[in-house]
């Protein structure tokens, strides 16, 4: 008979007491991990020059409401409608702005849109328009509008010339604006292409 170099493992069959001990140890590890959490992280945009800390029990500032704004559109008796809107902190002050695309509610055709940046006022009165990114006089329609990484991104549909029918935009461009030195600056990336 040959003696094995491996010890006899017959006594290692798991019994209910082993499972109970394992479960208790795991519960202790999970509970300990829950108690030993790191402090809450704080984030702010780099290069903004200021940082704003909000107390945990303070409700976040709501974004400006587009319904409370009179957009500078000449609609000739028709009402102005908001076709797209997005919100985000564009200037790094910890309060969200709203970027809205608005146009006249025409019965037919493709009326031009304006793109406006709204900010809340300190006295909680109606929000105010602080910038016009796209003027309706430019005859553009807004296909997409979003705020990403603190930048405003828009996809606009327009016309290559005055002879193109208003129903059928034939050009597309993608524009980006960034808040720099107290104003919105359009990026150099202006991709225009025929539709």
Image: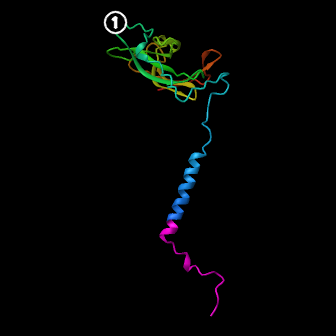
- Position in image of residue 45 (x %, y %): 63, 27
Q: Nearer the viewer, residue 18 or 109?
A: 18
The residue located at (62%, 38%) in the rendering is: 39
Range shown magenta: 1-19
Question: Where, by quadrant of the figure, is residue 6 drawn?
Answer: bottom right
Is residue 164 visible in this depiction of the protein? no
Question: Where, by quadrant of the figure, is residue 191 drawn?
Answer: top right
| Residue holding disc 1 | 77
Left or right, 18 with respect to 73, comes to right
Quadrant showing the N terminus: bottom right
Q: Mark 1: which secondary structure?
A: loop
Q: Nearer the viewer, residue 101 or 189?
A: 101
The residue located at (53%, 64%) in the rendering is: 21
Q: Main secondary structure of the magenta part?
A: loop
- Position in image of residue 177 (x %, y %): 57, 21
Q: Nearer the viewer, residue 173 or 2?
A: 2
Please tell me whether residue 8 belongs to the stretch shown in magenta: yes
């Amino acid at each position: 008979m040959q003696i094995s170099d491996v010890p006899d493992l017959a006594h290692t069959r798991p019994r209910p007491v082993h499972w109970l001990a394992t479960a208790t140890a795991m519960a202790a590890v999970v509970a300990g991990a829950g108690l030993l959490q790191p402090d809450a992280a704080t984030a702010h945009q780099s290069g903004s020059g200021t940082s704003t800390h909000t107390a945990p029990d303070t409700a976040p500032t709501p974004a400006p409401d587009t319904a409370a704004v009179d957009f500078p559109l000449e609609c000739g008796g028709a009402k102005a409608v908001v076709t797209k809107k997005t919100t985000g902190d564009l200037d790094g002050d910890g309060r969200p702005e709203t970027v809205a695309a608005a146009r006249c509610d025409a019965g037919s055709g493709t009326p031009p849109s304006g793109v406006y940046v709204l900010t809340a006022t300190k006295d909680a009165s109606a929000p105010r328009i602080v910038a016009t990114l796209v003027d309706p006089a430019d005859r553009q329609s807004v296909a997409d509008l979003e705020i990403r990484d603190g930048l405003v991104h828009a996809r606009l549909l327009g016309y290559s010339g005055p002879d193109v029918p208003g129903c059928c935009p034939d050009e597309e461009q993608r524009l980006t604006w960034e808040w720099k030195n107290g104003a919105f600056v359009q990026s150099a990336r202006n991709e225009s292409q025929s539709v």
